[in-house]
Amino acid sequence: MKLFATTDSCRLLADPEGPAARRFRHYNAFLNHNHRALRLLAELELLDRGAGFATLASIKRRTGALLEEVRGLVAALSALAGNRYHELLPVFEKVAEELAPWIDQQRSGIEGPLTLPFGKLGREHIPLSGAKAVNLARIKNELGLAAPDGFSVTTAAFDLFLRENRLLEPIDAMLAAFDPDAEETDASCHRIRETICAAPLPQSLAAAIDREVRALAARHGSRPQLAVRSS
């Protein structure tokens, strides 16, 4: 007895737009969102424990991605359960709203002088000049011991440099995608360095550095030999 005709052999046994198919799509979406959310949580937990390197921008990127995955997970769960968990979405949106200012916050400008001579540096200037420069200056200023003279180019100066050249957003974008274990890490670092080196020095910063060099020469009676280092 012939049960099926050859024309029936490729017919779908279930309606691809029917209830069962829709439930399967919601279930599949739930699993995918859950898998990606757990992976992001694991990455953030490892970074919190100090395992690996991350920039603030990359942490914000992961947090934003985690929120999107959880939003999708909640929506898929609600659809899968016939909207029995409709109260979850408002709770999630409240949490997301509380996190939004931290994720979306704009970096505030750094206030302070663009340069500072060593003779004026004290402990309170560490945020502006860095610990190395401040401690070197304190050897002479507070202990009266012999130490090199000089001046610091402050973090306020670097902030001005980045803002005047509109580098904050493109560098943050590069840092957000930065992965120290990726093969293209060296290329990413090279692009950031090239972007900074190609930018012109703001006129006010160039003038401030020139004044410090002239003052340094005046204090020592000749054109000084200068060494430059990062702090």
Image (tube, rainbow, N blue to C red):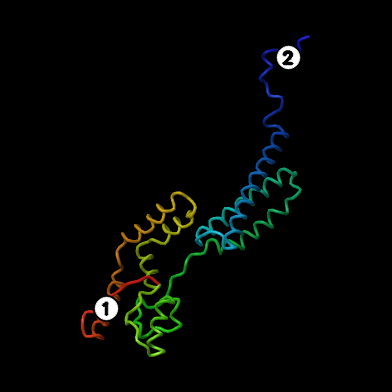
- Which one is nearer the viewer's eye here, 17 or 191? 191
Q: Quadrant of the C terminus?
A: bottom left
Q: Is residue 114 above or below residue 21?
A: below
Which quadrant holds residue 116? Answer: bottom left
- Left or right of 1: which side holds 183? left
Q: CA distance from mark 2 to mark 1?
A: 94 Å
Check disc 2 and give the amino acid type.
Phe
Q: Quadrant of the N terminus?
A: top right
- Residue at label 2? 4
- Left or right of 162: which side holds 48? right
Check disc 1 and give the amino acid type.
Val
Q: Residue at x 21, y 82 (%)?
A: 222
| Mark 2 or 1: the one toward you | 1
Q: Is residue 1 above or below residue 157?
A: above
SS for tag 1? helix
- Residue at label 1? 213
In the image, farthest residue toward the right? 1
Q: Residue at x 29, y 75 (%)?
A: 209
Q: Position of residue 199 (x, y in %)?
A: 32, 61
Q: How would you rate the neighbour count of disc 1 (Cα within 10 Å): few for under 14, some for 14-19, many for 20 or more?
A: some
In the image, farthest residue toward the top? 1
In the image, farthest residue toward the front? 146
Which quadrant holds residue 120? Answer: bottom left
Q: Position of residue 163 (x, y in %)?
A: 38, 65
SS for tag 2? loop
